[in-house]
Image: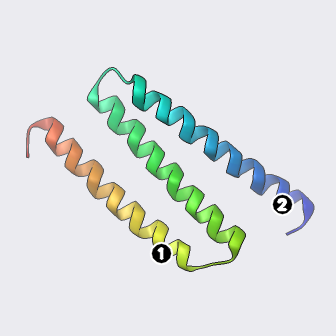
Amino acid sequence: MDNLSLIFFNAAFYITLISIILSFIRFLMGPSPADRVVALDAMTICGIVLIIFIALKMGRIIYLDVAMVYGLLSFLGVLAIARYLEGGL
């Protein structure tokens, strides 16, 4: 990586960390359960992005599989919570 792409890579990494912190604050302050579910989903998406950043930085392709499985489990978890909030479970 050249110097400019490394700067952009690091900036995107830290912006993603900040977004996780802000989502966590929203998760704690959310007045309704739906707000908390959306904040939790945002945190998992940012976590997936962080796993992908780590995979790119370390050059390990196996972490991309981990990110994909984490994304699928996150999607199923959000669906289950949404069904529960609707009273369907």
**What numbered label is drawn on residue 6?**
none
Q: Which image quarter: residue 69?
A: bottom left
Tell us which disc is closer to us: 1 or 2.
1
**Is 37 on the left-hand or right-hand side of 51?**
left
* Residue 53 percent across, percent down from the top left: 64, 62
- The residue beneath circle 1 is 65
- At 53% across and 72% down in the image, what residue appears? 64
- At 33% across and 61% down in the image, what residue appears? 73
* Circles 1 and 2: CB atoms closer than 8 Å: no
- At 22% across and 44% down in the image, what residue appears? 81
- Secondary structure under badge 1? helix
The residue under label 1 is which amino acid type? Asp
* Residue 60 percent across, percent down from the top left: 63, 78
- At 35% across and 56% down in the image, what residue appears? 74
Q: CA distance from mark 1 to mark 2?
A: 24 Å
In this view, 83 is above or below 7: above
